[in-house]
Image (spheres, grey):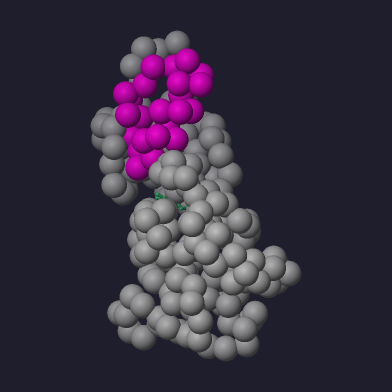
Amino acid sequence: MLTVALPKGRIAQETLDIFETIFDKKFIFDDRKLILDVDNFRFLLVRNQDVPAYVYHQAADIGVVGLDVLEEKEFDLLRLLDLKIGRCRVCVGMKNEDTLDYNLPDIKIATKMVNITKNYFSKKAMAVEVIKLYGSIELAPLVGLSDAIVDIVETGTTMKQNGLKVVETIMESSAHLIANKNSFIEKKEEILSLYHKIEKYI
Ligand code: PRP
């Protein structure tokens, strides 16, 4: 039995589609249910940012999660495979009329991704004040809460619609298959068999 943590939403659907194709079976969650048992798999629907915690604490053996979340959470997990879905970028954004001046002291950056932001700007030897938000990040510079943001850009529509532009790209991201290190030892054959099937599919 393998327990798989999936991030609610489109990536969960696309991952279940991969499973449906590989195993030629239906993998469909009942309305509002968070657990789905099919054959030797148990799927858990969790929040995107919670996938690493479920896998790290072995509540799930494996999981699917964006590289951006893995970088942000800094858990010790095995990264098995790039699923090449859920592609996006982590970017620094500013108002269209603004520019990022590295010489300015104490630039304020609003973000959900505090660790990625701190690591990025400290590598550039730039002192920034990070303001942690939980969503609607694009609003922050519009109302003077911050000078810039660090956020996910997928289509770019949200930034564009709010008069913001990308000034720098910090990283490219896509959904990765991850595993708990102990699970990988205890259930090596099961995990590797699934890994090879998915790898072939991709
Ligand atoms: C993400 C991100 C941006 C948006 C970018 O938010 O924080 O707001 O998507 O997508 P786009 O470039 O295609 O417009 P999400 O929808 O995940 O909501 P959240 O802010 O609640 O995390």
Q: Residue at x 50, y 50 (%)?
A: 77
Residue 45: x and y in percent read 38, 70
User: Which residue, as the protein is rendered here, is positioned at the far front?
Assistant: 186
Residue 96: x and y in percent read 45, 33
Q: Residue at x 48, y 28 (%)?
A: 120
Count of marks, rendered view? 0
Q: Is residue 112 magenta?
A: yes
Q: Is residue 129 left or right of residue 42?
A: left
Q: Nearer the viewer, residue 145 or 78?
A: 78
Q: Is residue 48 above or below residue 142?
A: below
Q: Is residue 157 above or below residue 27?
A: above
Whether residue 154 is visible to the viewer of this picture, yes or no, is no
Whether residue 122 is visible to the viewer of this picture, yes or no, is yes
Q: Is residue 21 above or below residue 101?
A: below
Quarter occupied by residue 95: top left
Q: Nearer the viewer, residue 149 or 165?
A: 149
The boundaries of the magenta stretch are 108-130
Q: Nearer the viewer, residue 75 or 141?
A: 75
- Which image quadrant: the C terminus? bottom right
Residue 81: x and y in percent read 63, 57
Q: Residue at x 42, y 83 (%)?
A: 37
Q: Is residue 79 left or right of residue 114?
A: right
Q: Is residue 114 magenta?
A: yes
Q: Is residue 125 above or below residue 84?
A: above
